[in-house]
Amino acid sequence: MFNFNGNVTDLSGIGETNPATLTFDDLSQQGGQLKNGKMQYYGLNFTVTGSYTAKTSRSFNLQAKAKASDGDERGHGDSSLAISLKSSDGNDNNLDGTVKVLAGGPNVGKTYKMNFARG
């Protein structure tokens, strides 16, 4: 299992920053399709799925979904995110990219920076 700790930040870099954790199974066993990822962000537990490319220039196109019943105390309904990450070092130690809010909450349609470090 790979574990990453990171942050989600306003694109301007001056807004709110919130911690996030991302975990997924060893990619060498998944054949380009991430099937069993998990992410904790903003009090919600997301299931993460999607695709990724070869290790030398690894990129991820992921979808994250969370049920409102899994921690949404604000009553915004189910949450859905589109995540795009790249391995900045070629070894998957650092993943950087963006996350777009597709559903759930007042920030639908907004895009944020997302950065993770394995650890």
Image (cartoon, rainbow, N blue to C red):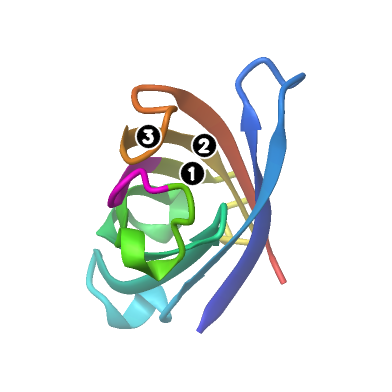
- Quadrant for residue 83, please give it: top left
- Name the residue type under label 1: Lys
Q: At numbered mark 2, what does the secondary structure look like: helix, strand or loop?
A: strand
- Name the residue type under label 3: Val
Location of mark 1 (residue): 86
Residue drawn at point x = 38 percent, y = 74 percent: 27
91 or 24: nearer the viewer? 24
Location of mark 2 (residue): 97
> Residue 5: horizontal and vertical position, in percent?
67, 62
Location of mark 3 (residue): 101
Residue drawn at point x = 46 percent, y = 53 percent: 56
Instruction: Answer above or below: position of 15 versus 57.
Output: above
Left or right of residue 4, residue 64 in this image:
left
- Name the residue type under label 2: Gly
Between marks 1 and 2 in the image, the one whose residue lies nearer the viewer: 2
103 or 90: nearer the viewer? 103
Marks 3 and 1, the one that precedes in the sequence:
1
Residue drawn at point x = 77 percent, y = 19 percent: 14
